[in-house]
Image: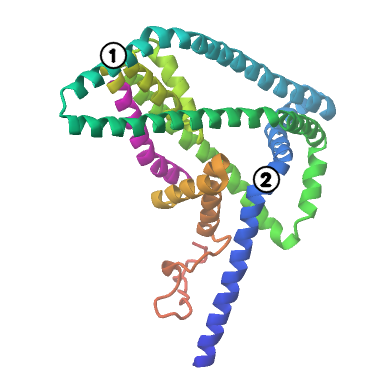
Amino acid sequence: MNDALSEKRKRFIINFVYFAIILLLAYFALKYAIFAVMPFVIAFLVSWVLKPVIRFCTGKLKFSNKLASILLVILFYCTIGVLLVFVSIRLTSFLINVLGRIPGIYEEVLQPKLTEFAAGIDSYIAQLSPETAAAFEEAMANVVPAVFSFITQLSEGLLDSLTRLVGKTPSILLSVIITVISTFFITIDYKTVTGFLTKLIPKTMRPLMHDINTNIVSTVGKYIKSYGLIMLITFAEIFIGLLIVGIDNAGLIALLIALFDILPVVGSGMVLLPWTIITFIQGNIWQGVGLGIVYLVVVIVRQIIEPKIVGEQVGLHPLIALMAIVVGTRLFGGIGLFILPITCALISGLHRQGKIRLFRDKDSAPADGGAEPTVPPESGDTTDT
């Protein structure tokens, strides 16, 4: 009895160490190696997306595979480039307009408000007792340097981020060039590349890899659908809120903020919070309160519906979906918002289909722990059920 128990414990420790090593290797691979191979991953995904169109061009339009591949890759990346240039021009124009208005906002709005605030503080201090006034002035003397220190650190952080982004520009351009070139090579020889990758997989693992590929396509499609629904709900919330607050061009602004809200690093707060603060500084108290309420509603509703919608779409319990979203974002940054939930959904789907076994389902095992009894078919019934 003791030997059997000791053997079980030893097997548990070995399995635990084995899976711990696998998880650590997967973590470091995703954390560091994924950015090195990302150009090739993107190139392969673009080739996979273009594959049906290439098949149509070679079958119906009688193009050669090489010509169709080259033309479609050029068309794809030219379209992406035009869209990026258009968005960059509009964003640059918007930033120039905003930055150009900052001096006027400071002189016409912020400086008078600060002067009025300082005068109100002086008037309030004059009405206090000497002891209270001294304590208040001492507190303000500590608060003001802290505020300026915070503003300085924030400015230095933004400048440092901008400097690092500029420093990474050559690396980003090199990655883009590698991605485009790799897309040409993979698209032209798609069957050769996929055939080579298939040969690297042991024959016993190929059926499982086929199931994984099928499940990945289905899971990613459901994941995109779920976040499309979340973005639609966010757009409706912001649009209705801006209409109530009385903001012009509410539809366009709501659409832009909803797009920002999908991004894990940016979020709607990058737009709504500064907008709310500026509105308060300009003296539009009720409009500022309205924008603040819109922001709170968006944040609260997003936290409630995101795990539920994502979980239902990809087949995860809302709690597991929430944990995957939070842990993935914490461990891997913005890309973890997609990688970990999709991975969990993929593993869960393969378990439900019986392709892999994570644990023994109670319903699948007999109650007495023995073999499941075989029920003989009824007389006259020779067909399988």
Q: Secondary structure at mark 2?
A: helix
Q: CA distance from mark 2 to mark 1?
A: 54 Å
Q: Which mark is residue 116?
A: 1
Q: Position of residue 308 (x, y in %)?
A: 39, 44
Depth check, front residue: 45 or 365: 45
Whether residue 205 is visible to the viewer of this picture, yes or no, is yes
Name the residue: 61% across, 13% down: 89
Direction from residue 118 to residue 365 in the image, left or right = right
Above or below, 266 relative to 196: above
Above or below, 318 relative to 270: below
Q: How is the image coloured?
A: rainbow
Q: Which residues are magenta?
A: 290-314
Q: Which residue is mark 2?
A: 34
Q: Position of residue 90 (x, y in %)?
A: 57, 13
Q: Nearer the viewer, mark 2 or mark 1?
A: 1
Dominant secondary structure, magenta: helix
Q: Label 2 is placed on what type of residue?
A: Ile
Residue 141 located within the stretch drawn in magenta: no
Q: Label 1 is placed on what type of residue?
A: Glu
Above or below, 83 relative to 14: above
Q: Secondary structure at mark 1?
A: helix
Name the residue: 45% across, 72% down: 365
The quarter of the displayed image where residue 174 is located: top right
